[in-house]
Image (cartoon, rainbow, N blue to C red):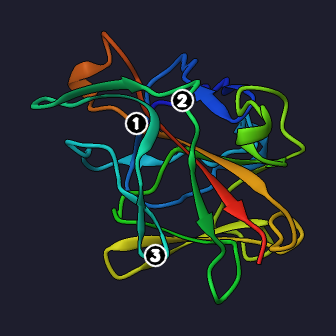
Amino acid sequence: MRLLRRLPLVVGGILLPTTLGACTFSSPQTIPAESQVSEVPLLEYSGGNDRPPILTYGQNVIAPYAVDWKSASTTEFSDQTGSLPDVLPVRVDGPGRFIIEDSGWPQYMQVSIFRGSAANGLDPLSTPDQSVVCSDEVTSLCHISLIEDSLLMRLSPDVLSDEEHQVVAISAEYLAEPDLHMERFANVVNWVLELEPR
């Protein structure tokens, strides 16, 4: 396996790919500490997705805020930056539960939290009030686990509360197919939504 040297560039809550090597993935696999080049586990590639994964919050499908995705059969690019995100009530079982309707593990996933409302001028490209990198570690403030054919992402109440307006920006990076590595190493999708207090 070739190592992927990741230099994630995050502008506010939006992840921009700056990948310098090649790697592949199927399930999380931490490499030894002496060979790590970042805090993010390197993964093995066993196949890519034709299209970006779907993110849901409760019964709501969250449209991508920005996406740059390419596979052998599909190319998707959209940029909704500058538009207002959907405002949703928090889930009955707590605000921090999201479903990614795809069983593929991202190479990198980060959640940024902004206190306040986008309608009042809050910009999800600005510096967030809090930002966490997601992982499958049980102690993670943003924990990812596989549930049947989807990934469950849970944010700790220390990260996301239900007592104030908060804009949530979720950025995910997935490895592109090896045949595309002359052009890109990663596909990127970002979602932005706003949660209103209870």
Whether residue 116 is situated above or below residue 180 in the rendered picture: below
Residue plotted at (85% across, 64% down): 164
Indicate which label's residue lies in the foreground, 2 or 1. Answer: 1
Quadrant housing the N terminus: top left
Q: Residue 146 bears which disc, if any?
A: 3
- State yes or no: discs 2 and 3 in contact (Cβ < 8 Å): no
Residue 149 picture quarter? bottom left
Residue 183, given in percent of the width and then of the height, sits at: 32, 11
Q: Residues within 10 Å of mark 2 (few under 14, many from 20)?
A: many
Q: CA distance from mark 3 to mark 1?
A: 18 Å
Q: Residue furthest left?
A: 73
With 179 as the anchor, is 38 left or right in this view?
Answer: right
Q: Amino acid at mark 1?
A: Leu
Residue plotted at (35% across, 52% down): 53
Residue plotted at (72% across, 64% down): 196
Q: Amino acid at mark 2?
A: Leu
Residue plotted at (79% across, 38% down): 120
Q: Looking at this view, is 173 or 78 the one in front? A: 78
Instruction: Tell me which label, 2 or 1, sits earlier in the chain.
Output: 2
Instruction: Tell me which label, 2 or 3, sits earlier in the chain.
Output: 2
Q: Residue furthest top?
A: 182
- State yes or no: discs 2 and 1 in contact (Cβ < 8 Å): yes
Under circle 2, the secondary element is loop
Q: Amino acid at mark 3?
A: Leu
Q: Looking at this view, is 61 or 71 the one in front? A: 61
Under circle 3, the secondary element is strand
Whether residue 179 is situated above or below residue 122 in the rendered picture: above
Q: Residue 4 bears which disc, if any?
A: 2
Query: What residue does disc 1 label?
Result: 175
With 35 as the anchor, is 46 left or right in this view?
Answer: left
